[in-house]
Amino acid sequence: MAGAGGGGCPAGGNDLQWCFSQVKGAVDEDVAEADVISTVEFSHSGDLLATGDKGGRVVIFQREQENKSRPHSRGEYNVYSTFQSHEPEFDYLKSLEIEEKINKIRWLPQQGAARFLLSTNDKTIKLWKISERDKRAEGYNLKDEDGRLRDPLRITALRVPILKPMDLMVEASPRRVFANAHTYHINSISVNSDHETYLSADDLRINLWHLEITDRSFNIVDIKPANMEELTEVITAAEFHPHQCNVLVYSSSKGTIRLCDMRSSALCDRHSKFFEEPEDPSSRSFFSEIISSVSDVKFSHSGRYMMTRDYLSVKVWDLNMESRPVETHQVHEYLRSKLCSLYENDCIFDKFECCWNGSDSCVERPEVFTSVTEARHGAVCFSGDAERRQNQPGREKTTGAAAASGASGKKAPAVLHADPVSEAPPNYLYTCSFTRKTLLRLK
């Protein structure tokens, strides 16, 4: 584990300045493949951060209390709990190995002392309960202090068990296992705003689950053609609306986004809205279809906008305007001239995520810059406590702030998630398996 001082970073004028804050995990070059981080997710309060790796493990970090000497700085994240979520499996009917790699993690809203999260690999989704215990019961009538059963004939008086303090213990226990519902690899899970259901999506289908029912799900989207040779696109990401439990959105490999309303029909094959940006014929090339594939889609916290990520850009869409995005941010345009090389080493097929900051605050023109630090395999890096740039007049405040990870020569997934409660530009979190990373600087 390595760390660096973060804290507040004053910036001159209205400039936005990023500061290196913290790194958790191995920083060595030679790291096992199982230690490579595959997904990250903040809890709704931002106090907990869950990471999943290719070895099927989930590591949860907890933010420490704020330092009284630095009241405006956020506490560091330290390891809170570690558990094995998934194990490697083998499908004997299809002679197919099922990796233990964690594809997605989603927190459920906290409703009591315990916390719950969903984690999934390619085929199986699990619901985990994360709870704390700092007291133990002593003084049982039917067993001794060491746990051995007592002879009932020798019990002459009844005792009232008492609770005694003990060292804090964090327990992770599986509560539900949702399996055998997907033929293809699961790429998305999303918890509904009703807190009772969630969706899971693979390449061709989206299923609706109830959190209390594990033996059946409802298929709400199915784009599989009768003849697989007629297949022209696949589902790449799906998400529920943050406030309307009947609305969901999913993206495709053709660069389109479909918004569906489950009130219209049980099977949402007919979309309610269709978002697609017209392609410029003059800029079309051999790689156009590949780089236009949408790898991630996220609703803003207000539910008014959504953000999509393709290979070279981040786009912000207004749900009331389907014809074109309201904003387009070029993430790393310099790669456009190197698409041929990226195609040869398969890096052009890498998938990248995007996220909003905690307040959906307005952004101005984007600027691409390269961080001076390096991220290694299995490392979690934080950049924190940046000064907020004032909004320029004439722009809506709800247009949204976005951050996106970059591409590099080494083929690896890039995962990203922002602190959900930060009002200033948040403690953006990014994990990479390549040695240099590019972030979208928002001004």
Image (spheres, rainbow, N blue to C red):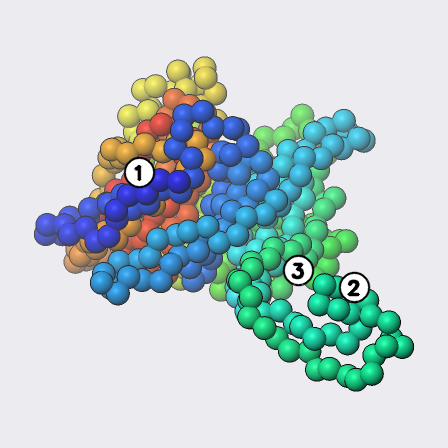
Gap between marks 1 and 2 measured at Cα = 59 Å
Q: Residue at x 62, y 45 (%)?
A: 85
Q: Which amino acid does label 1 sit on?
A: Leu
Label 3, residues with CA under 10 Å away: few <14, some 14-19, many ≥20: some
Label 3: state its secondary structure. loop
Quarter-of-image position of residue 4: top left
Label 1: state its secondary structure. strand
Label 2, residues with CA under 10 Å away: few <14, some 14-19, many ≥20: few
Q: Which residue is drawn at 70% across and 75% down?
A: 139
Residue on which the image places disc 1: 439
Label 2: state its secondary structure. loop
How far from the left and from the top, in percent, is residue 239? 52, 51
Q: What residue type is labelled 2?
A: Arg
Q: Is residue 380 left or right of residue 117?
A: left
Quarter-of-image position of residue 309: top left
Q: Which dot marks residue 73?
A: none
- Marks 1/3 in contact by CB < 8 Å: the verdict is no
Q: Which amino acid does label 3 sit on?
A: Leu
Q: Who comes first in sequence, dot 1 or dot 2?
A: 2
The label nearer to you, 1 versus 2, is: 2
- Marks 1/2 in contact by CB < 8 Å: the verdict is no
Q: Who comes first in sequence, dot 2 or dot 3?
A: 2
Residue on which the image places disc 3: 211
In depth, the one of 193 and 290 nearer the eye is 193
Gap between marks 1 and 3 measured at Cα = 36 Å
Residue on which the image places disc 2: 148
Gap between marks 2 and 3 measured at Cα = 38 Å
Q: Which residue is drawn at 82% across and 70% down?
A: 150
Q: Which residue is drawn at 67% across and 72% down?
A: 138
How far from the left and from the top, in percent, is residue 94? 77, 29
Residue 352: tell me if it is visible.
no
How far from the left and from the top, in percent, is residue 16? 19, 48
